[in-house]
Image (cartoon, rainbow, N blue to C red):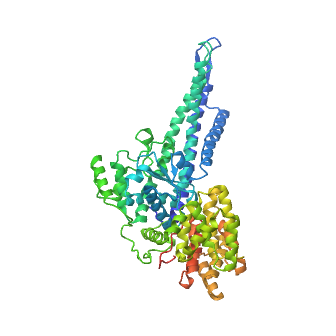
Amino acid sequence: MSTNFFENQDAARRNTKRLVALFGLAVIAIASMLYLLAVLITGVEQAGPNTEQMVVSPLWWQPDLALGVALATVVVVGGGSLYKIAQLRSGGSVVAEALGGALIPPGTRDADARRLLNVVEEMAIASGIPAPPVYLLGDEQGINAFAAGFSPGDAVIGVTRGCVQQLSRDELQGVIAHEFSHILSGDMGLNIRLMGVIHGILIIGIIGYFLLRSSLFTGSHRRSSSRDNNGIPIVAVGLGLMVIGFLGTFFGNLIKASVSRQREFFADASAVQFTRNPDGIAGALKQIGGYESGSILASPNAPEASHLFFSQGLRSGFQMLFATHPPLEERIRRLDPNWQPGTRRERAQAMRSAAAGTAGFTAGGSAAVDSATGDVGAGSSAIGQVGQPTAEHIAYAAALVERLPSAVVNAAREPYGARAVIYALLIDREDDPRNRQFDQLARFGEPGIETETRRLLPEIEQLEARYRMPLIDIALPSLCALSPDQYQAFKTNLRALVVADEKIELFEWVLQRMVFTHLRPHFERVKPSRIRHTSLRKLSEPCAVVLSILAHAGSPNEDSVRTAFELGAAQLPGVDLALLPRERAGLRELDRALEKLAEADPSTREQLLRACAACIAADREVTQAEGELFRAIADGIDCPMPPLLPGQPLY
């Protein structure tokens, strides 16, 4: 089982191709059954106008009919799938709301909700992505959760009330780590497409149901003689389509099971890697086994989203014939080989006792945190941990949040204050641009936002540079809650603050790039990047821009600039690269380069990040500015970079 982010991304692409192949086979099978139904229906002829006797004389091979049925099947099934995927294009919030979820406000004071948001926030900072919005399924007593969305930028996490109330913090952290694995591994996009595919396959049965219902309803009101049987063919078509729809359900469950089951084992293993605490996720699974409501969801929309859940969300029956999740006992034994199941009551009592004795944040005791500085010992290379945060990163994130001023954190956790936090991070220290910036906020900002920015500014100016990126990560979920008009005003003000001194500093570009990369999908129609390149040979120009900017940013003289560039270029054999002068390697050129490089496949992006790391590490020192730029580049090509730990090598 692969543990590398880039290998996981490649595996997700292969699974997508597998899904397309299975979908094609299902369409062929459905078209074949529809053709047989059409042959039978068209082969029914009445013996005469004055008799009810029917004779079945089908002609089994009719090319024109076969072609018509095939085209109709592709249009109906394919159209149904595309419609559902388009419906879900807005992101995971559509799925969460369909399941009865309500968004938890980032600034909530509810104790259970705050505990949940804190766990998600720590995991997000540790992963190098903004904290996804969290939805509470308040009417669901079963212990379950899910992650939904096409990418980390539009991901949401949904958690049932039973999950929040029944699990200890360690167990809840294990569940959230499992869901973050799905976010980071590329599973979510596959899951959303799978929902579209299943909807397309099932639509034939839906049409049959409405045809049958319509014909029966019409027949009950028809004022005609008992000899009138014109409605019989419609009833037969409806019944036939319902039977085919039933078989479509079979195919749908088969596809979900074949795509989903092994990924749950991987997500369990990843959760242990993230938290270094197998008892957390194992305890959550044991709680499900001993809990009266288990992990069952009552929502009528649960069946179509069953493959998204942390644990099996449906009761036994036909829908369990091809379960989307491995057996609970098997998952627990992989995490705790010494586990003995016992009875349901014994499990419930044992787990309630265990939960009562667990409190506070732990990372399995593996991460040594310096209480004075918040530093955590470094492990493997930064690139090796892209999309794979560890317990050290989670402990580091928790320590950073703990050391941030409470007034600043509280402001960042609600939409109004989050804007002031971002504005304050951009306020210049020189008087002239500073005055222009405050004048911009006073004239065009939200009412009172200039005063709020001034209030937060002293504490934000005193922060060490390493706290800036986590603060942005905390603020982003709150900014996603802005109205469209508020977003447009925020975007205008932010850009005005950046150019107030008539130049763009490196951190200003990093902040602006990351904020808009993650906010735009929530407020604007953003065309997703498509994989167009499996090699960097046709991307030599954007590669040269990225490496040239890194070389110029981290080296004091031309000789060291060239040395850094050449070390980076050496990581890309076969790519024709030339060092660009500073005037040809600006931040605008970097924006365009990242758009092109985001079209490379995962293994190719890994090559690029290694080249960037070699360029940065040429002088054997990684400055805070270089670390922020490196993360922004990784973020720009959809590679979530955990925070650099003190003393951690880049590659």
358 and 14: which is toward the camera: 358
Q: Residue furthest top?
A: 50
Residue 574, relative to residue 443: is it above or below? below
Task: Please state the horizontal and vertical placement of residue 167, each as a whole percent of the image.
Answer: 38, 55
* Residue 127 picture location, percent across and down: 50, 66
**On the rendered image, what quadrant is the N terminus found in?**
bottom left
- Left or right, 134 with reference to 277: right
Considering depth in this image, is 521 or 579 the residue closer to the camera?
521
Q: Say whether residue 616 is visible.
A: yes
Is 241 situated above or below 497? Answer: above
Q: What residue appears at the point 35 percent right and 56 percent down from the top-left corner?
A: 283
User: Which residue is pictured at 39% across the width and 60% down the height?
Assistant: 169
Query: What x and y, as percent, mark residue 434?
Result: 67, 76
Residue 579 versus residue 92 in the image, above or below:
below
Q: Is residue 422 visible?
A: no
Q: Nearer the viewer, residue 525 or 241?
A: 525
Nearer the observer, 97 or 18: 97
Q: Where is residue 194? Give x, y as percent.
A: 54, 49
Kindly indicate the quadrant of the structure image that contains residue 622: bottom right
Q: How many marks?
A: 0
26 with respect to 500 (left or right): left
